[in-house]
Amino acid sequence: NTDLGETVMMPNSLLLENAIIGRTLDRFGCIQARFPVVLEDFTQLGLLCQQVLERVSQHPDVISGDRVRKMKESDPKLRIFEPQCIFKGFGPAGALLEVLAYTPNIREPRFMQVESEVLLAANEAIAIFGAAIGLEAFTSAAVLGRQHSAAQRWQRRKVRTQARRQYLEAAAASPAAA
């Protein structure tokens, strides 16, 4: 069956003479991304996933709703699914969410544009919800920033102590001080 549910007829001789290759994945683009999210109240993760899912499903190039059902009715073995936003556990930078969505087979670079639009829609839903993407780089930079600040404070104390010693030594050795 085609994506529109039309039956494709093939002569038996072609089936017996040639290799049969399943091309389900070639017929669709798969958008899949995993990212950490930071919330003030992690009990709201389920609601956040619903909000992200709604935004992703609204994209016109994402296959969802009736389109998925009709395609599955015409070909029950079809390996595509409704868009999903799934909580995958916790990582060092926050709660890990995974977004999965299928599009019709769109050639590059249009697929990259659609993928970007879908992920930006997910990001917008996260921001509207009051959450933020928990980038490890930001987390590491914040931790390193604190460590760096402590090191800077220690270095400044060391320099001030050395400067004070040099001043006192110079003052003690100068003839004006005598």
Image (cartoon, helix red, strand yellow):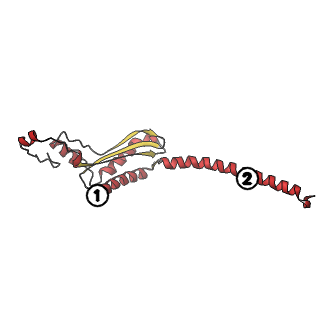
The image quarter in which residue 80 lies = top left
Q: CA distance from mark 1 to mark 2?
A: 58 Å
The residue nearer to you, when weighing 39 against 10, is 10
Residue 97 image position (x, y, % from top left): 39, 43
Which residue is the site of mark 1? Answer: 110
Residue at 91% x, 59% y: name it.
177
For marks 1 and 2, give the one nearer the viewer: 2
Residue 157 image position (x, y, % from top left): 72, 50
Residue at 20% x, 42% y: name it.
78
Secondary structure of the residue carrying tag 1 is helix
The image quarter in which residue 108 lies = bottom left
Task: Give the left or right position of residue 8, taking residue 120 as reference.
Answer: left
Is 36 situated above or below 112?
above
Query: Dot 2 surroundings within 10 Å: few (below 14), some, or many (20 or more)?
Result: few
The image quarter in which residue 18 lies = top left
The residue nearer to you, when weighing 114 against 62, is 114
Which residue is the site of mark 2? Answer: 159
Residue 2 image position (x, y, % from top left): 15, 48
Farthest-out residue, right? 178
Task: Give the left or right position of residue 159, taking residue 171 as reference.
Answer: left
Residue at 30% x, 50% y: name it.
57
The residue nearer to you, when weighing 90 against 65, is 90
